[in-house]
Image: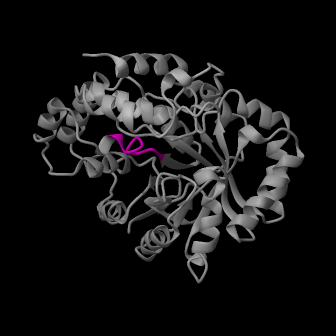
Amino acid sequence: MKYRPFGRLGWDVSVLGFGAMRLPVIGRDPSAIDEPEATRMLHYAIDKGINYVDTAYVYHGENSEKFLGRALKGGHRQKVKIATKLPSWIVNEQSDFDRLLNEQLKRLQTDTIEVYLLHGLNDRQWPKLRDLGALEWAEKARADGRIHHLGFSFHDTLDVFKDIVDAYDKWEVCQIQYNYMDVEFQAGLEGLRYASDRGLATIIMEPLRGGQLTKRPPDTIAAMMKTAPVNRTQADMALQWVWNQPEVSVVLSGMTAMDHVTENIESAEKAAVGSMSAAEHQLIDEIRTEYLKTTPIPCTSCKYCMPCPEGVHIFQIFELYNDGQRYKDNIRPRMVYKRFLGGKQADACVECFECEEVCPQEIPIVEWLKTAHDWMLAEK
């Protein structure tokens, strides 16, 4: 395993972090973690040198932290740094800060959390937490040892990102979405460099864009990939592109199966700054341009929009619609939509807009649901 300095915090982090948001589950219930398999994956990753584990209060129906508390017993806890997140959107008063952190410590079965992030900051959540005194509270939590380092995860525009970074000179960590498709999306490359220049450790989420960059590409992109000067899998190409950049501290991967773990660790063992050639960078730029022509809805299946109060399976509908457009497939997505969709169809939406309030990608979900529904029911 390769390691890099974790910002200015004085310790080295594995270049690959274990994300506990997409663990294997039993059946189709995201809250029913397959604990034996997930534990096997986690222990294997730690034994191979991964020393950073990322979770959050809400992951897997609020069961991810509980799972980690159980799975890290027996010596594995001492080998890793745990990162978890304050669920910003359910904080309504000052007393929530202590209540939620203490609950998370109990779930994780630990006395301290090494990295504590304010989850999903944007132009709505950040002013609320700031005005409730989140920063002053966090300094007390650091002083009493319940947390060691403070940061934030982010989903909004570059300007908002810079404002948050500049608002507090004691930020130590930031977590942003970044991959070769998202160089100008949200914080993007400029935000990555902005934070790194100010000494923040930078955590990268969605390096494979929720698995999108590992799926069978359109024929045009597949042909382009065959011309690559280095023979890589799609996932390895995407990961190496991120690790190639010196501003990146650690890359998170939400792994659902053991082969994801073994393949990503194999990639991590090759991670190095400046390892990709100019020809590879040019090819990725060309692939990005081509992909942008074929993916209409920028959904990463993070499931922040779920559960829908009306039972609409939003992310799955978007995935089916994107697949239909990307692969020019009018059959399979429509068949799945009509016969096997896990929830209600898109026309069950009552336009409450709760999903749009929490969508990290700022997708106009309601309008896209209408578009997707019409396409799914079309005859041609």
Q: Residue at x 32, y 63 (%)?
A: 259
Query: Is 332 positioned to the left or the right of 4 in the image?
Result: left
* Magenta residue check for 301: no
How are the residues colored? Answer: one colour
Compared to residue 74, the image places residue 308 above or below, namely above
Q: Can residue 18 be seen by looking at this rendering?
A: yes
Q: Position of residue 52 (x, y in %)?
A: 53, 63
Q: Position of residue 10 (x, y in %)?
A: 59, 64
Instruction: Look at the image and give the residue range highlighted in magenta.
Output: 205-212
Q: Residue at x 37, y 51 (%)?
A: 243
Quadrant of the image containing the C terminus: top left
Tally the marks.
0
Q: Can residue 183 be seen by looking at this rendering?
A: no
Instruction: Name the outermost residue toward the bottom.
Output: 74
Instruction: Name the outermost residue toward the front.
Output: 339
Q: Residue at x 28, y 43 (%)?
A: 215
Quadrant of the image containing the N terminus: bottom left
Compared to residue 261, the image places residue 375 above or below, namely above
Answer with the quarter of the image where residue 68 lies: bottom right
Query: Is 233 positioned to the left or the right of 354 in the image?
Result: left
Query: Is 270 positioned to the left or the right of 315 in the image?
Result: left
Query: Is 210 positioned to the left or the right of 80 in the image?
Result: left
Q: Position of residue 280 (x, y in %)?
A: 20, 41
Compared to residue 331, the image places residue 202 above or below, namely below
Q: Position of residue 328 (x, y in %)?
A: 22, 25
Which secondary structure dominates the residues rendered in magenta? Answer: loop
In the image shown, does 56 or 64 lie closer to the viewer? 64
Compared to residue 250, the image places residue 91 above or below, namely above
